[in-house]
Amino acid sequence: EADIYQTPRYLVIGTGKKITLECSQTMGHDKMYWYQQDPGMELHLIHYSYGVNSTEKGDLSSESTVSRIRTEHFPLTLESARPSHTSQYLCASSVTGGPGGELFFGEGSRLTVL
Amino acid sequence: AQRVTQPEKLLSVFKGAPVELKCNYSYSGSPELFWYVQYSRQRLQLLLRHISRESIKGFTADLNKGETSFHLKKPFAQEEDSAMYYCALTQANTGFQKLVFGTGTRLLVSP
């Protein structure tokens, strides 16, 4: 079934640990995005990619990094987690030529750094 | 700078009452506006886009460029409309859907 998957859904980790949030989509979409959302706040775009080996930083500065080696996979990595990284991270995808503005979101990864 | 403002964090109405979720934006170019919705325990999903001029689940939204608003309206609210609603914009005629979101409004429809 065509979908977009995020793992883990919830992660509690200590300061200084390296973490990777996984995002995979089986929708055949070329564009993928990472948004960050703190409780009660707006979603902020932190990374996006319009294809393999193409990544760009979003509007909100983030210490995380991303890679796009395969079309369907867009992982986000924090080399050394800090409490300020505690947030919800939403992955999304869209297709070139599709109806404008339609992003397909995953269920999100809620990260807590102690 | 692009900005989307949703002034109400919570809107509580009774079933059958009219609903209006407010959205104002600031954007120097020509924007495209959208409403996204997140029902309880579901993912964020597109509800409607202004260029389609569509009515989805009884909801409509009209882009008012003079007032820079894109309010979401429904004449008779239903309990199943209870959800989190986000207004969003992107630059028109771009192939890249980088959306800017508002902070969202929680709609609670009581029986």
Image (cartoon, coloured by chain):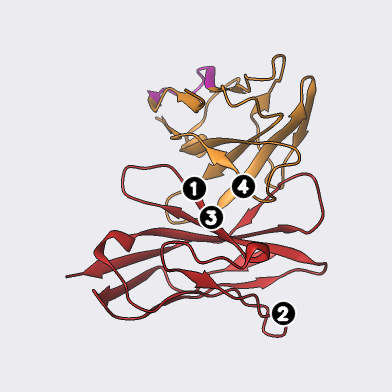
Q: Give the range drawn in magenta.
A: A12-22
Q: The numbered mark 2 sits on a residue in which chain? A: B
| Residue type indicated by callout 2 | Lys
Q: Residue B45 carries which label?
A: 1
Q: Is residue A20 magenta?
A: yes
Q: Which mark is in front, 2 or 3?
A: 2
Report, in whole angstroms, how far the alpha carbon at label 3 lies from the one at label 4.
Answer: 17 Å
Q: Is residue A40 visible?
A: yes
Pick the residue in front: A69 or A98: A98
Question: On the rendered structure, is B77 left or right of B93?
Answer: left
Compared to A75, does A92 lie above or below?
below
Name the outermost residue toward the bottom.
B66
How many circles with numbers are drawn on the protein?
4
- Circle 2 is placed at which residue position? B65
Q: Which mark is residue A17?
A: none
Pick the residue in front: B93 or A74: B93
Q: The numbered mark 4 sits on a residue in which chain? A: A
| CB under 8 Å between discs 3 and 4 | no
Q: Residue A42 carries which label?
A: 3
Q: Which chain is red?
A: B
Report, in whole angstroms, how far the alpha carbon at label 2 lies from the one at label 4.
Answer: 22 Å
Q: Does the magenta stretch include residue B69?
A: no
Q: Chain A is drawn in which colour?
A: orange
**Disc 2 and disc 3 on one polypeptide chain:** no
Question: On the rendered structure, is B48 left or right of B9?
Answer: right
**Disc 2 and disc 4 on one polypeptide chain:** no
